Image (spheres, coloured by chain):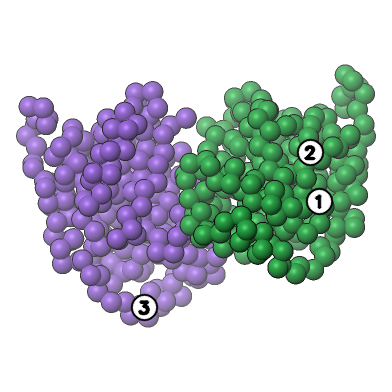
Chain colours: A green, B purple
Amino acid sequence: MAIFKQLFDEATSTFTYLIADEHTRSALLIDPVHEQYERDRALLDELGLSLKYVLETHVHADHITGGGRLRHETDALFIVGKGTGLDCADRLVADGETIEMDSITIQVIATPGHTDGCTSYRWEDRLFTGDTILIDACGRTDFQQGSPERLYQSIQKLLAFADETLIYPAHDYNGKRVSSVGQEKTINPYIAGLNEAAFVAKMRALNLPKPKRIDVAVPANSLCGGADVPRQPGETEAA
Amino acid sequence: MAIFKQLFDEATSTFTYLIADEHTRSALLIDPVHEQYERDRALLDELGLSLKYVLETHVHADHITGGGRLRHETDALFIVGKGTGLDCADRLVADGETIEMDSITIQVIATPGHTDGCTSYRWEDRLFTGDTILIDACGRTDFQQGSPERLYQSIQKLLAFADETLIYPAHDYNGKRVSSVGQEKTINPYIAGLNEAAFVAKMRALNLPKPKRIDVAVPANSLCGGADVPRQPGETEAA
């Protein structure tokens, strides 16, 4: 069985996910948080894992990614959706591509709507949905090229998976940690019983305050975490 | 990857779980419901599966098990916790035993408290908790040899698994389908912040109505589903 960990940053209510091959000890992190760099490194060390990839679900507005420092201090490659257009990334992934890491295969699913470049990742029967589907909620669409129409379509794309498919979001503010496609279809108030027009109207009627960290987080994340050092072809940390 | 399905009986809010080996097509069901026999047989047929085992988490008070009819009409063996003392079972399993079905291994965890014979089953990182842990709740302890003290200890036993361990209960009445050890530790009002004394007091203060079907369900389930035909050694349905 693969290694799977769900980590939580209290300050920003952000989930970070670790997936690793139990034999080769190769690991990837989804949505690490800058302030949790020490925690993440300690966990990798404790489990004897070698970090190969940092996957971002999007350019976050609420926290700075840990990917900048992690790629600087390990050999990890920084991967993000093509829709972000981030020049600083090691790899931009498009819908339908796969990310292979030994026995681990990750399917890339473009899910624009919360932001242009939002990407979900599927590993086996687990969907890492970023801010596209949150438990009983969904990402807002009022900044960073947000679009309720596109988000609606992206949510439908994820709901097309089997009901048992697990949903692991980028955030939860109420102590919830995991859901499933079947659960979200049944009780998510932004999904259950809403057609596109009703969803769009509901999203447009939200009147949300500006995220506290957006003016710091978006510029830093647009540079892949700020501590970004552009790689030369063939260059590694050991070089 | 193994096959995994979560089924729901609306009338009694009962979850039935199907686990199958994708290569050999051997299958087991956890907590089937009598009235859903046709649904379960149709699903097995559709997926080309052969039912080997019916696992019961306990002698249910709210529905009659589908295990009676399933074992009568297939070659499936009926398995239940030793604490139930059910003579009609094909196998009584005790804490720490495993149930092997090709590539599938199920760990038996005795979790008395809701009833004497309550058993949880672990498959990989998934716990099938019956009525021991429900999502944001737990099973009642005011009938069928229920004991809040024993239930408290059983819940602790399940919470000792890693936070990422998934919890699949026998019921949910509010549309929820899956949780995790970490989530239940954090927000289940029968778990979070309660020591044994507080839990016992809370359970004792509940004043719940008698379950509607208990007078029918418990006698039938005590006969492994009513349609039970005791097997002779070596006898199968084909004989």
Observer able to see residue A167: yes
Q: Position of residue A134 (x, y in %)?
A: 63, 55
Residue A54 at what x, y percent from top left? 75, 36
Question: How many numbered discs sit on the rendered protein?
Answer: 3
B77 left or right of B228 in image: right
Residue A75 in the image: above or below residue A219: above
Say which chain tag 2 marks.
Answer: A
Q: Earlier in the sequence, mark 2 or mark 1?
A: 2
Taking the view exactly as shown, the residue that stands out farthest to the top is A234
Q: Residue at x 88, y 27 (%)?
A: A237
Residue indicated by mark 2: A83
Name the mark on residue A145. 1
What's the CA distance linking mark 3 and mark 2?
Answer: 53 Å
Label 3 neighbour load within 10 Å: few <14, some 14-19, many 20+? few
> Label 1 amino acid?
Gln
* Disc 1: host chain: A
Mark 1 residue crowding within 10 angstroms, few (<14) / some (14–19) / many (20+):
few
**Looking at this rendering, what residue extends furthest in the front direction?**
A197
* Residue A141 pos. (x, y %): 74, 56
Instruction: Give, as a three-letter code, the residue at label 2.
Output: Gly
Q: Residue at horizontal 48%, vertical 50%?
A: A182
Q: Which residue is mark 3?
A: B206
In the rendered structure, the answer to whether residue B17 lies left or right of residue B236 reads right
Measured from the top left, where is residue A177 in percent x and y? 58, 55
Q: Are marks 2 and 1 in contact (CB under 8 Å)?
A: no
- Note whether residue A131 is visible: no
Helix, strand, or loop for circle 3? loop
Q: CA distance from mark 1 to mark 3?
A: 51 Å
Labels 3, 2: front one: 2
Secondary structure under tag 1 reads loop
